[in-house]
Amino acid sequence: MNITYEHKPAMTFIGFSTSIRPEEGYRKCPEFWDREYAQKYARLWQTMRPETAVEAAILENGVGLFAICDEKEGTFEYWIAGPYKGGDVPEGLKLYTFPESDWVMFSAKGPLPGSLQALNTQVWQEWYPNEGQKYRGNGNAMLEVYSPGDMQSPGYECGIWVPVCRLEKENETADIVSAMTITGIL
């Protein structure tokens, strides 16, 4: 797991989403990619000629280069997305904006979905309980980042980006953990 920290301006994405329970994420997220991206747009990927406004927006905005995991109460909204370049937002697609933020960016190599799922586990079981205690999330969402190329290759690169704010005082960590415990998150 490689880790970098970087400040980024606000970023807006375009895509489509579904609601998934956290305990089903490692199964349902790959199923969503297969059903709603690979199969649904198989003709588009073969021809690269859009026939609908949604297909044109998918190609123009690189939908599929990112996924957004937006935590909700008891579920998360999982998006297949791309960086929004402007223009019409066709019915069936929607926008999501991350505010200007510092980001912690994790990267890994290996075939999907295993490499990304292993990276996700490392982020929340290794980084978060240690170095991650110096930060709080800036919002409720994070990004999955996908590189072009053969997603089944041992050298395939993917990542997880988390928008964060550095904690101002040490007591803030205890306050956050206490609030998470009271609300049942921990």
Image (cartoon, grey):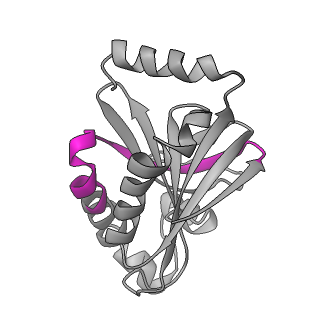
In this picture, residue 150 sits left or right of residue 102: left
Q: Position of residue 23 (x, y in %)?
A: 22, 43
In this picture, residue 137 sits left or right of residue 7: left
Query: What are the residue bounds of the magenta stretch?
Result: 8-30
Queried whether the magenta region covers residue 85, the answer comes back as no
Splitting the image into 4 quarters, where does residue 113 fall?
Answer: bottom left
Number of labels in the image equals: 0
Queried whether the magenta region covers residue 13, the answer comes back as yes
In this rendering, the answer to whether 65 lies above or below 186 is: below
Give the residue at x 75% y 39%.
Answer: 100
**Residue 80 at least partly seen:** yes
In this picture, residue 128 sits left or right of residue 87: left
**Residue 113 at least partly seen:** no
Q: Position of residue 5 (x, y in %)?
A: 70, 53
**In the image shown, does 73 or 184 lie closer to the viewer?**
184
**In the image shown, does 179 or 23 lie closer to the viewer?**
179
Q: Quadrant of the C terminus?
A: top left
**In the image shown, does 123 or 142 lie closer to the viewer?**
123
In this rendering, the answer to whether 71 lies above or below 118 is: above
Q: Position of residue 101 (x, y in %)?
A: 72, 39
Give the residue at x 24% y 53%.
Answer: 28
Q: Position of residue 38 (x, y in %)?
A: 34, 71
